[in-house]
Amino acid sequence: MTIEHTAEILREGLAFGEAPRWHDGRLYYSDFYRHGVYSMAPDGTDEQLVVEVPGQPSGLGWMPDGSLLIVSMTDHQVLRLGTDGELTVHADITEHCGYWANDLVVAADGTAYVGNFGFDLDAFLAEHGVEGVLTPPGPPTTNLVVLSPTGDLLQVVDDMAFPNGSVITPDGTTLIVGETMRMRLTAFDIASDGTLSGRRTFAQLELVPVDGICLDADGQVWVANALASEALRVAEGGEITGRVATSQTCFACMLGGDEGTTLYAMTAPSSDHTIVGAGDRLARIEAAVVGTEGAGRP
């Protein structure tokens, strides 16, 4: 049985919100085309600029010392915002990126798992349409990059089809990555040194290009459906057990709020940069209370 929810709009006026994270009682998020990381109160008020990122911010994650890692997309860097407010380069992953760097998740020890597009998504869709994703050979694959807590390269995992939203289970032993272009959630075992092995399918979905994801305390994954106005709760094996309907296409989601049971959804009319990057500020943050609290990382 699929439990249905409907989100309410909490905040409007974003350009394109991504990488929502619940941290210290506030929702943090990136806005691609306002070129900044922001935070807001649980009810959508009191938006504050955390830091400007000219290279277009995406994935966010906190290090053990309280500093914040930020993916800078267009220059393929992972930045580190220190607790003193200084912004430095944590790592440059240019040689491992097929196109823009994108989302990341940071483990409790500071190991970071960073994805990238692998190709120019907007150009590919303009030429081939969604059908081009489904027709072999499809778009190019790319790498998932594993960085040590000091920003050194630990591992490069190849043949990833647009590695996107990622979560780490509460025990720190499993990484789940959304492969957008394979419409699946892929799991890995995490070794004590942070490296990955045991690649396997956690859930294969049908016509759901997985974007941002988050994990709940039942071990199920909330998935932003980048082709529809919804986020889906997915059990291992692929059963859809919950759905949050949103007002426009959902590109990322995060569990948070005072009880940990509010699903925050980042929505927009499109992901095409020629539309959402044009200055109209049509993106939103929406929310619905669901039955199970968030767990793991981010």
Image (spheres, rainbow, N blue to C red):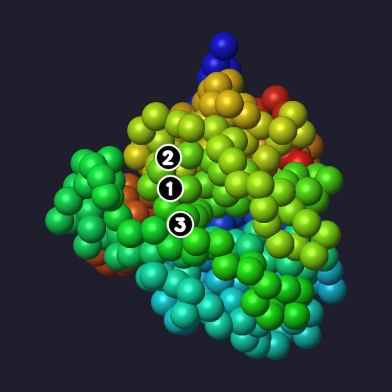
Residue 209, position in %: x, y? Answer: 40, 42
Question: Pointer 3: what residue?
Answer: 159
Question: Pointer 2: what residue?
Answer: 183
Q: Which residue is at the front of the view, 154 or 5?
A: 154
Q: Nearer the viewer, mark 3 or mark 1?
A: 3
Given the image, on which type of amino acid does mark 2 rest? Met
Dot 3: element? strand
Alpha carbon separation for disc pair 2 and 3:
14 Å
Question: Pointer 1: what residue?
Answer: 180
Q: Can residue 56 be seen in this view?
A: no
Q: Are marks 1 and 2 in contact (CB under 8 Å)?
A: yes
- The answer to whether residue 43 is left or right of residue 123 is right
Given the image, on which type of amino acid does mark 3 rest? Asp
Alpha carbon separation for disc pair 1 and 2:
5 Å
Residue 91 numbered mark, or none:
none
Dot 2: element? loop
Specify few, some or many for label 1: CA neighbours under 10 Å numbering under 14, 14-19, or 20 or more: many
- The answer to whether residue 119 is left or right of residue 236 is left
For the point 45% across and 57% down, the residue is: 159
